[in-house]
Amino acid sequence: MPPTAPRGTLVEVFLVALRLGLTSFGGPIAHIGYFRREYVERRRWVTEETYADLLALCQFLPGPASSQMGIAIGTLRAGYPGGVLAWLGFTLPSAVALLVFASIVSSVDLAGVGWLHGLKIAAVAVVAQAVWAMSRTLTPDRERITTAIVAAAIVLVVANPAVQVLVIIAGAGVGWWLYLDTAAPSATAHARGSRTVAIVCLVLFAALLVVLPLIAVATGTQSVAIVDVFYRVGSLVFGGGHVVLPLLEAEVVPPRWIGPEEFTAGYGAAQAVPGPLFTFAAYLGAAFDVEPNGVAGATLATGAVFLPSFLLVWGTLPFWNRLRGVGAFQAALKGIGAAVVGILGAALYDPVSVSAIFGPRDLALAAVLFGLLTAWRIPAWAVVILAAIGGEVIAL
């Protein structure tokens, strides 16, 4: 999946990702909309089809899909260092904000805060804009429209993160069945990465899952135990950032690494900052009642929870590129793209809309923000600011 623009500089990749990290409110589903607007529409680093391919890949993988998207696009743009810097730029703002929050308060209640509610409404507009734009490209005929509708219905009725993966697999089968005779092999360019590196990454990913628990038990070292917990959670969670919260609570609260009140406070703060929700790990690592904590704990926990994403993306991306050159796989990707539109459409309703739209005023603000994004092409960061102001007005 080559970028449509020439290979970029590391500074460029970092600064663009940093901008996204400072302005991408609304959680992993909304991030997909922000990323699409920045990388596909504004900068044209990847095509709509390539973006959909990457999205399908990241939906297949466990871990934070939006962060993995950033790693993949950064890697395509500027190689492996580009992937690291794309992740760093997107992650750093929220990680630092949660680290600061952990250092100055022990608990906070953000329920009912107007500007926070406005940010949730902004997410509705961003996701709606992404669904609307992607549907025009990825569901151009009635077969793919039907596939998207069926996918959305299944995901809405069966509320299970694993179902999303099954829907994507089913979409691939539908695409292969419908479009195999008309699919042409894609002319793919040089892939960013090698099979050798990919195999090493996949082997290392599996080895760490087995070895880290053994080392933690054998040594009794708290640092290793923290790395083990966060690496395991980052490796096995499907369904996005919100799914990681109950898993982490089960791992860190019972052994009294952190109290339930402090855990809940960090959860509230994580909702209020931009960037990936997985940076909740930075708050936990900093607020731990056991050593290491503070900056060291935050760095350790954050690095461990995101490490599987690097290993999985780099381990699968070269093979994903080669598969795109197969006509049969191109046919399957047509069905996958339609299924992805359906999944995003379902997410627009639940969890995005049901957690943000509680009355006609909320719906009116979402409609205005959607119009600003689509008709007036207002930048996403400006829409977020207007949404926060609008949330405060609604609260009054």
Image: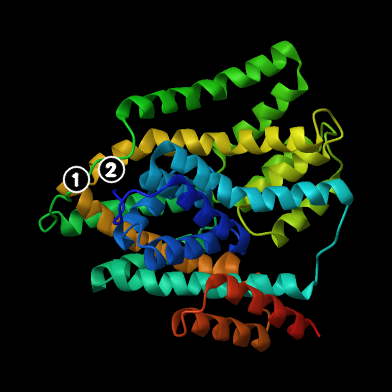
Seen at 37% across and 68% down, the residue is 134
Q: Secondary structure at mark 1?
A: loop
Q: Looking at the image, do the residues carrying marks 1 and 2 touch, with CB atoms under 8 Å apart?
A: yes
Task: List x then y, in percent, for residue 388.
Answer: 69, 75
Q: Look at the picture and state if 396 lies above or below 184.
A: below
Task: List x then y, in percent, for residue 81.
Answer: 46, 38
Mark 2 is on which residue type? Asn
Task: List x then y, in percent, for residue 245.
Answer: 69, 47
Q: Look at the picture and state if 361 lies above or below 5.
A: below
Q: Look at the picture and state if 375 lies above or below 162.
A: below
Quarter-wise, where is residue 338 in the image? bottom left
Residue 356 in view here: no
Within-10-Å neighbours for mark 2: few <14, some 14–19, many 20+: many
Q: Give residue 216's mark.
A: none
Instruction: Please state which of residues 363 and 304 is positioned toward the viewer in this rendering.
Output: 304
Mark 1 is on which residue type? Gly
Residue occupying the far top of the picture:
218
Q: Give residue 321's mark.
A: 2
Please state, as top left, top right, bottom left or bottom right, where the C terminus lies in the image.
Answer: bottom right
Seen at 65% across and 34% down, the residue is 230
Mark 1 — residue? 325
* Number of marks drawn: 2
Q: Is residue 296 left or right of residue 39?
A: right
Q: Secondary structure at mark 2?
A: helix
Instruction: Please state which of residues 163 and 108 is positioned toward the viewer in this rendering.
Output: 108
